[in-house]
């Protein structure tokens, strides 16, 4: 991987590594809290997994570590499972181990196409709804009131019911942090540019804002509190040192209980990582390998489990920052991990007076970007089925939770696709005069062939559409005077399942009784191979399969 | 419907009506017991619903009434819901009402294609497993021991655990009934034929065997019991008279709880009815209308609810008997219903000493025919995916129950189809010298066009395969020296969803940055209509879409 690695690349990777680390430290702590874990577990998840990914992954710039949506999914999965903090941590480790194993197994089986099951509308609706759910869940931390996790309506109701208990100091801290984070973006960048800084440098400098805000808030709170109790909820004592590798891992129960949740976390983690990795790779004409990504992300999560912490994935905003900060290779990620490790070992007590509301503010500002209304609108405009899928996924996540929403979205997208192909495009065709081309008789001025009905099937013949195909063929025969031949043009048929086989068998028998001969043309190699092995279709394949429509028609006209 | 109805038809319908009624009376009582209801409820379900179906259905010979699989599904749905007999009956009525409404709504929405979601392997595995489950569930009634309903292993375990409690009198009665039922088929028919009877008459006579056996068993048991207690469990007092229309219907709770079960009963009832109706219609070159069948079956089930009884469907064996007995129209069904009504009103006390073991024997012999091993084997041989679907459905029904099995089978069949199309067939093509045909460069000796890569996509472009298509295209470009044009032949593309749209948009942008022009050919009308409305694709559709590959190639060679 590192052959030809030169000084220029090292410098670029070094800069990117530092910038990403500055962004990552507060985010990692925030996402651990979102997952229901102590803050330091986020730091642990930002050390071992990215190094493992760096060694095995195919993306040069993907930043692997704790991410918001996976953190929420962990909290959701553990809500009904863990009662004590110890059980919660154990549960998170079990999830990491299972996510790792599932991805690894999928990778070893070469199932990179798993991504195929999560359509764009499902991912879009799911991500927006999950982000909204995270926003609402942070309401408590932002306002200084306790609310329990739940569906969006439940949490909103709790927030409203307890509105009188809002803590002014916490709310003010949160508001200040959010304001500072928002100002640190475009306004500050523009200001720096006005002061003569280049766009890129200004942009990179503004990336350091979250850490600066965290440090400032921590220092201010330390000064206010003095040696007494701080006036708002703070992170508190974070034990320093590195994680103790997987103490509770093999003692943990609930491997079976957590497996379905792990499967969904693995699927979403993989799909999101691949999406980011591919977008970034395309910008520099690089490629990512779906199967090797499964293995690399599997190993990264296994690393997470061994390090005793939560599942990880490739994070969208962090990877973009890493990329834009100039990262060339995964050396940047290793530098980031080293810096986070230094913080985790020696500097955790610096964050003792960090207000939790500030971490909540960082979460809120980060996930707000995941809500993509414009994309939703354009999807809804382009395709009604996709729009319905997106809307159902979105609403189900908010009303029933993150896992039901994901399952509903995926199921619905499959149902809609199958429903769509259940009425395949078909056409009765005739010859374009003077050519060997055959076209739809309804759209073109073509020659008909008395006694012969030629039908083109524009879809695979499989369980969902055999019924519609059968009806179309019978109707076409009924509309023809004294048909003697039915010719099926199979140009677009790549696959015939056993329901399709039944259709062909029954059709052949039924038509023979009615004195009509069934012929096939342009049967694709793999389809012909399988059908011709079926005893009932032997007579058909022996004499009535033709290489092209033209040959079939000539044969029938001659015979 | 009855115009042109003549004496010959009336005679045929009359004979068929009587024969079917003779078969139906014992079956209807048996299926009511299978559903957990008193025997007379089966008779009620055999009166109103078939008359309603006769008025609205499009099949001339489908015999609608209580059927075995739906009866088992009713028992399953009510097991966790109803405690008393009254609640059980109420629940069955609610299910009938919901099944009726769901089918009616589907019919009014024109969703006849719903049948598309239940593939042949799912139906085959489901039916065989349900039949096996029914067989096992009758074990208790056949042997005179009480077992509770449950999954196949649970019931088998209970039977084995209580084997010492087998009641010899009941077991002997059951064995005699089963033997008699089996002998009444082929052996008796052959005997009658040997006595000079025609095959058809002999066959019809053997159909009366179940009723003869029921009458014989009842009489014998009455003689044995005298005025005392009969030695085996009997049907007992059946109140005569017609059903009281839907007393408990609007007071019944649990409409929401039972809805998912009702949806599955409706789906399976519809699919089985359509399957039977279509097979019979094809034999006489008649047609059934899928949408009108939804309405007719919906109304029949609504009739069932109003009559205060269980859901109904078109039964396989009974419809075949009706057809083979010569039924020409639904007049036969009306005659059958009238005869059953006469039994229900005046003759129910005749069945007071009918042993339950005899009804169990009738169920066992009837459903054993539903287990179709040969079909299973041929499906497994033809298609591995279909074989897996069938096996998973079968095993899940036996181990986890009838509803989980159906849901698992349907979901798996959708996943397998989408998985299959997620790696679409694609080919780099070139011109067959001297023609305008383009063929796969790997299989044919064709001309290549320097600087131009032509790819044919043999599948719809949708969420499951955009990733694979993208990779294929990038690979094809990489293997070409200095490509300037990428031409996509869209002959087989009937549908592009929003994920497919993203692919085309991104591809167009990415290729432009690399100095490669994307061109499309043979875009189908509906696809072109939708894509050309998208702003990002306007430049593409303005200049780079061609009617045929030949025109595209000529254009590019000229330009």
Image (cartoon, coloured by chain):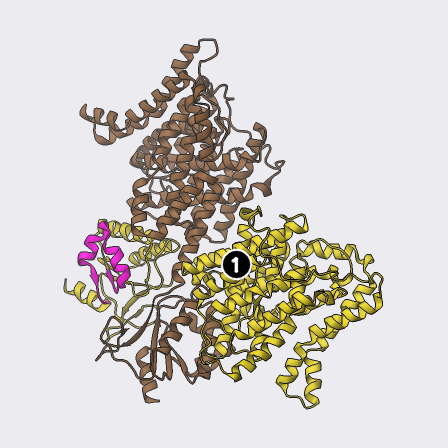
Chain colours: A brown, B yellow
Task: Specify whether residue B538 is painted magenta.
Answer: yes
Which residue matches tag 1? B302
Q: Is residue B404 visible to us here?
A: no
**Res B324 quadrant in image:** bottom right
Which residue ends up furthest to the left in the rendered image?
B559
Task: Specify whether residue A223 is painted magenta.
Answer: no
Q: Chain of mark 1?
A: B
- Pick whichever, A250 or A528, lies toward us: A528
Within-10-Å neighbours for mark 1: few <14, some 14–19, many 20+ = many
Q: Is residue A454 above or below residue B458?
A: below
Q: Is residue B299 visible to us here?
A: yes
The residue under the point 45% across, 45% down is A406
Residue B190 at what x, y percent from top left? 69, 85
Q: Is residue B347 left or right of residue A421?
A: right
Which residue ends up furthest to the bottom in the rendered image?
B196
Residue B167 at what x, y percent from top left? 82, 61
Residue B182 at what x, y percent from top left? 71, 75
Residue B111 at what x, y percent from top left? 42, 60
SS class of the residue under badge 1? helix
Span of residues in magenta: B520-548
Q: Is residue A385 above or below residue B359?
A: above
- Pick whichever, A472 or B551, lies toward us: A472
């Amino acid at each position: 991987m590192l052959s030809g690695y030169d000084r220029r690349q090292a410098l670029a990777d070094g800069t990117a590594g530092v910038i990403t680390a500055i962004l990552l430290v507060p985010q990692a702590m925030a996402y651990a809290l979102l997952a229901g874990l102590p803050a330091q577990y986020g730091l642990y998840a930002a050390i071992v997994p990215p190094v493992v990914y760096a060694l095995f992954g195919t993306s040069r710039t993907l930043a692997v570590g704790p991410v918001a949506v996976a953190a929420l999914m962990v909290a959701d999965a553990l809500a009904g499972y863990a009662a004590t903090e110890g059980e919660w941590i154990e549960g998170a480790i079990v999830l990491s181990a299972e996510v790792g194993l599932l991805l690894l197994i999928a990778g070893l089986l070469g199932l990179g196409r798993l991504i195929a099951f999560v359509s764009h509308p499902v991912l879009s609706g799911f991500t927006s709804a999950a982000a909204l759910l995270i926003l609402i869940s942070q309401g408590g931390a932002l306002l200084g009131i306790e609310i329990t996790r739940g569906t969006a309506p439940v949490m909103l109701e709790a927030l409203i019911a307890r509105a009188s208990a809002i803590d002014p100091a916490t709310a003010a801290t949160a508001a200040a942090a959010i304001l500072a984070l928002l100002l640190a973006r475009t306004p500050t960048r523009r200001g720096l540019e006005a002061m003569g800084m280049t766009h890129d440098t200004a942009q990179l400098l503004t990336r350091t804002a979250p850490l600066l805000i965290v440090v400032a808030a921590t220092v201010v709170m330390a000064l206010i509190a003095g040696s007494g109790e701080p006036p708002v909820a703070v992170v508190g004592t974070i034990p320093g040192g590195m994680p103790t590798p997987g103490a509770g891992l093999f003692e943990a129960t609930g491997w079976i209980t957590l497996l379905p949740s792990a499967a969904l976390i693995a699927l979403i983690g993989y799909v999101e990582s691949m999406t980011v990795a591919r977008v970034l790779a395309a910008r520099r004409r690089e490629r990512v390998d779906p199967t090797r990504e499964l293995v690399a992300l599997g190993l990264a999560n296994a690393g997470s489990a061994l390090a005793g912490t939560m599942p990880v994935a490739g994070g969208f905003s962090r990877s973009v920052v890493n990329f834009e900060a100039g990262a060339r290779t995964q050396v940047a990620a290793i530098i980031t991990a080293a810096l986070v490790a230094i913080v985790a070992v020696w500097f955790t007590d610096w964050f003792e007076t960090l207000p939790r509301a500030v971490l909540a503010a960082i979460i809120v500002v980060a996930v707000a970007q995941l809500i993509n209304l414009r994309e939703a609108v354009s999807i809804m405009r382009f395709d009604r089925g996709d729009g319905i899928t997106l809307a159902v996924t979105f609403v189900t996540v908010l009303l029933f939770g993150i896992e039901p929403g994901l399952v509903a979205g995926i199921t619905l997208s499959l149902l809609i696709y199958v429903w769509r192909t259940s009425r395949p495009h078909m056409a009765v065709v005739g010859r374009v005069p003077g050519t060997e081309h055959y076209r739809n008789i309804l759209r073109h001025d073509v020659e008909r062939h008395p006694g012969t009905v030629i039908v083109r099937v524009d879809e695979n013949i499989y369980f969902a559409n055999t019924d519609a195909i059968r009806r179309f063929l019978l109707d076409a025969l009924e509309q023809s005077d004294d048909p003697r031949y039915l010719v099926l043009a199979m140009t677009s048929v790549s696959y015939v399942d056993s329901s399709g086989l039944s259709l062909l068998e029954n059709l052949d028998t039924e038509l023979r009784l009615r004195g009509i001969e069934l012929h096939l043309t342009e049967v694709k190699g793999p389809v012909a191979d399988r059908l011709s092995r079926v005893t009932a279709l032997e007579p058909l394949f022996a004499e009535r399969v033709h290489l092209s429509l033209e040959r079939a028609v000539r044969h029938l006209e001659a015979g």
